[in-house]
Image (tube, helix red, strand yellow):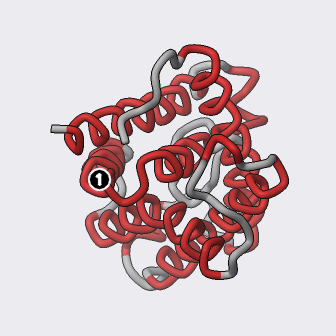
């Protein structure tokens, strides 16, 4: 039962970040600044991609136990974003496991103790966000451009690899750091009891 509660909590938190990202599309002055295009285009990264930071936060708190919930949610988000069938599983796996892989890399090189997520200092958190953003950007870049000769790229507005990297990486870093900070702030502001362990 505790595992189910953790998955539900993580799905709600991550789902809310995707909803906020979509709602930002309806604020006209922000469209050109945050999204570079007027409509959702998978080849263009958002300059404030909050979900990567929120996913990182949930993995720091709940660890591996939330894999099922995160996978299902990101798969559903991919369907709602009309990601083509040949990219949907790659998008899901990269988005779901990228932040977790960053945590494992961080631990492998013994860059800090992540067993107590609420005691991590901001520099280690920034390094963790950078690692997660690098994982996400490189893996999505390789995945998307692997399909460059197939029909998926014909529908992209900006199929330029340089533009892809220039929008994805900064958006993952900025959104990741802002997303993690918002999660920690809200945790300290509203949490009266510890999250499910």
Is 131 placed above or below 116 here? below
Residue 35 visible (yes or no)? no
Q: Could you say which is closer to the camera, residue 73 or residue 162? A: 73
How far across and down, in percent of the image, does residue 96 sit?
A: 41, 59
The secondary structure type at the circle numbered 1 is helix
Q: Could you say which is closer to the camera, residue 73 or residue 107? A: 107
Q: Which residue sits at x=66%, y=62%?
A: 113
Q: Could you say which is closer to the camera, residue 48 or residue 27? A: 48
- Crowd class of label 1 (few under 14; some 14 to 19; many from 20; radius 10 Å): many
Quadrant position of residue 93: bottom left
Quarter of the rendering occupied by the N terminus: top left
How far across and down, in percent of the image, does residue 106 sit?
A: 65, 71
Is 128 placed above or below 18 here? below
Quarter of the rendering occupied by the C terminus: top left
Quadrant position of residue 49: top right
Identify the residue at the far left of this view: 1
Residue 21 visible (yes or no)? yes
Q: Could you say which is closer to the camera, residue 133 or residue 113? A: 113
Location of mark 1 (residue): 75
Count the marks.
Answer: 1
Q: Which residue sits at x=72%, y=38%?
A: 178
How far across and down, in percent of the image, does residue 81 sit?
A: 38, 45
Q: Which residue sits at x=51%, y=55%?
A: 42
Quadrant position of residue 80: top left
Q: Which residue sits at x=76%, y=46%?
A: 174
How far across and down, in percent of the image, does residue 21 sit?
A: 55, 32
């Amino acid at each position: 039962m505790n595992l189910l509660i953790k998955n539900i909590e993580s799905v709600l938190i991550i789902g809310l970040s995707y909803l906020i990202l979509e709602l930002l599309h309806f604020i006209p002055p922000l469209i050109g600044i945050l999204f570079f295009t007027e409509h959702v285009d998978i080849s263009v990264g958002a300059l404030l991609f909050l979900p990567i930071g929120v996913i990182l936060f949930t993995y720091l708190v709940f660890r591996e136990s939330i894999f099922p919930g995160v996978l299902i949610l990101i798969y559903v988000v991919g369907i709602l974003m009309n990601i083509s069938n040949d990219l949907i599983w790659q998008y899901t796996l990269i988005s779901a496991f990228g932040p977790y892989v960053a945590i494992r890399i961080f631990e492998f090189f013994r860059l800090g103790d992540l067993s107590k997520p609420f005691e991590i200092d901001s520099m280690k958190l920034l390094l963790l966000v950078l690692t997660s953003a690098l994982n996400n950007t490189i893996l999505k870049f390789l995945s998307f451009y692997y399909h460059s000769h197939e029909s998926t790229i014909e529908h992209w507005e900006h199929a330029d690899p340089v533009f892809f990297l220039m929008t994805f990486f900064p958006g993952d870093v900025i959104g990741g750091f802002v997303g993690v900070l918002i999660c920690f702030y809200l945790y300290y502001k509203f949490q009266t009891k510890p999250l499910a362990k």
